[in-house]
Image (cartoon, helix red, strand yellow):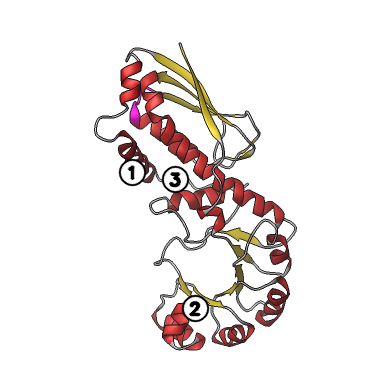
Amino acid sequence: MSTLPVLPRLMVIDAVNAALKEDFGRIGDITSNATVSPEIQARGVIAARRPGTIAGVPLAEATFHAVDPAVRFVARRTDGAAVETGDVIAEIDGPARAILAGERVALNFLGHLSGIATATRDLVTRVAHTNARICDTRKTAPGLRAFEKHAVLCGGGANHRFGLDDAILIKDNHIAVAGGVTPAIEAARACAGHLVKIEVEVDTLDQLREAVIAAPDAVLLDNMNPETLREAVAIIDDRAIIEASGNVTAETVAAIAEAGVDRISSGWITHSAPSLDVGLDIATG
């Protein structure tokens, strides 16, 4: 795997602080404060309870440190690592109250992001015999987009645009309002800076033929079956990056890739991937 980009510390801290404020409410963890003496120390491990691909370790570590800097967190698996059931992801020790208070937020980040990485890795593996790459979409949880897209990278996928401001993607509603495929592409080109890519979504081969003449940088083939995708690839004839989207599942992704597309975008890997089951077992001492 290529080296993963480092999550900006400021972004991690902001996300962790927001999650802890949500969980702590007005006066913090009243259960731990009532049942655990402040001098008690604890140690434990965070482990995988089923196989998967890990993502979110920096957020888990930052969570415990935000609750109490005295908590020691030693990562035994880094983001992007594959784990089997029972594999230790991290070891922790320090004030028991702090560990108990930070447990759920840390595991929420780790389980959610590892679920995305695991789902991505599954699709990536299924298309490994082709040249297609799996990428994400903007169908992400509000406030978590950067982390969810990081998790996609951990699973071996690629990132689509991060927001509305870093690429032009002309979709069906833009085409309807602009008056057609060609007017939409021409208007986009007139406004785009020289570093901004233009992609257009098409639903039919007729739309595709029109789009190719207008020369976008990329074409998104929406909800086309593999046979139609192969026709589309022939029409494009290497004149644009070819992205396929819609009805992408573990059962369909290989056939989509085998049609010859360059990218396969999936909203499912971020908005519906099941969380990876990870747990924290602690002991006093």
Find out whether residue 119 is within the magenta segment: no
Q: Secondary structure at mark 2?
A: helix
Residue tagged 3? 7
Residue highlighted by disc 1: 14
Q: Amino acid at mark 2?
A: Asp
Disc 3 marks a residue whose amino acid type is Leu
Q: Nearer the viewer, mark 2 or mark 3?
A: 2
What residue sits 49% from the left and 38% below the top? 110
Residue 189 circle label: none
Residue at position x 58%, y 88% in the image: 210
Q: Which residues are magenta?
A: 67-71
Q: Position of residue 201 (x, y in %)?
A: 54, 76
* In-front residue for pair 85/3: 85
Instruction: Provide residue 34's location: percent of width, then percent of height.
Output: 31, 18
**Mark 2 or 1: the one toward you:** 2
Residue receiving disc 2 = 172
70 is within the stretch colored magenta: yes
Question: Few, some or many C-alpha atoms within 10 Å of disc 3 (few <14, some 14-19, many ≥20)?
Answer: some
Side (left or right) of 189 relative to 67: right
Residue at the extreme left of the image, as rendered: 26
Q: Nearer the viewer, residue 282 or 129?
A: 282
Q: Of marks 3 and 1, which one's residue comes earlier in the chain?
A: 3
Q: Are marks 2 and 1 in contact (CB under 8 Å)?
A: no
Q: Which image quadrant for residue 35?
A: top left
Instruction: Reply above or below: 161 against 49.
Output: below
Q: How far separated are the C-alphas under marks 2 and 3?
A: 34 Å
| Residue in the picture at 42% in, 63% down | 163
In the rendered image, is residue 144 in sight? yes
| Residue drawn at point x = 60 percent, y = 83 percent | 208
- Residue 233 placement (x, y as % from top left): 68, 76
